[in-house]
Amino acid sequence: MLPVMAAKLAASFVGAALWAAFDGPAFLVAWAIGILPIWSELVATRLTGCEPSTEDRLPWKILDNCIDAGSFVLLPVAWFASVTRLGWPAYIGLAAFAGCGIYRLVRFVRKGLVSNQFFEGLPVTYTGYAWIVLAAVDRWNQPWVSFVLLTGLSYAMVSTRIRIRRTQTRND
């Protein structure tokens, strides 16, 4: 469990360092903040055979979800809020995304997987790819597209109608 969490955290630090180090291409920073933590978690899960979503020990589950909140919700929201030129529609969408993302993680800690197989609602880790799209939307100066995308992702995270099968590891 610890190597998977360390991989996510290290990838998030890389994204934050790229954001802090230079005002460079938004797509590169969006990739480092949104996608690199997803890939690092996936690789660490495959190498160790440890799946964080099936963790039974509550302290480890809470710690993993706190890292997810920082890596997949708070860091991307802070980054996009600092670089966007899209105004209040984007900020409303970011607030909805942050609130729904945290709610999704708290609900997961409380309820876990549905039938030990499915995530209920879109996992926050799956939203990482949206940040590249949002960087493009910011470049095209389309505030309502960012609002619709962020509120749509927010709804998908908290929806009880969406069920996504978890990935299998070699221990399953």
Image (cartoon, rainbow, N blue to C red):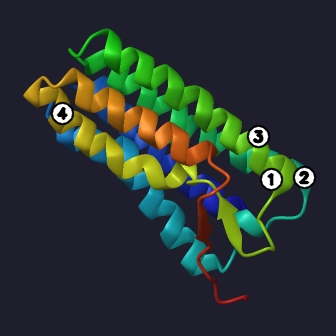
Q: Are marks 4 and 2 in contact (CB under 8 Å)?
A: no
Residue at the location (34% across, 45% down)? 130
- The residue indicated by pointer 2 is 58
Q: Are marks 2 and 3 in contact (CB under 8 Å)?
A: no
Residue 169, quarter of the rendered image: bottom right
- Reply above or below: 41 against 51: above
- The residue indicated by pointer 3 is 106
Residue at the location (56% across, 54% down)? 122
Q: How far is disc 3 from disc 4 in space, using C-alphas?
A: 30 Å
Q: Position of residue 93 (x, y in %)?
A: 42, 24
Q: Are marks 1 and 4 in contact (CB under 8 Å)?
A: no
Q: Secondary structure at mark 3?
A: helix
- The residue indicated by pointer 4 is 137
Residue type pointed to by label 3:
Val
Q: Position of residue 87 (x, y in %)?
A: 27, 10
Sequence order check, earlier mark of 2 and 3? 2
Q: Secondary structure at mark 1?
A: helix
- The residue indicated by pointer 1 is 61
Sequence order check, earlier mark of 4 and 2? 2
For label 1, the crowd category at 10 Å Cα-Cα, with few meaning under 14, some 14 to 19 and many 20 or more, is many
Q: How far is disc 1 from disc 3 in space, using C-alphas?
A: 10 Å
Q: Are marks 2 and 1 in contact (CB under 8 Å)?
A: yes
Residue at the location (16% across, 25% down)? 142
Q: Position of residue 50 (x, y in %)?
A: 70, 74
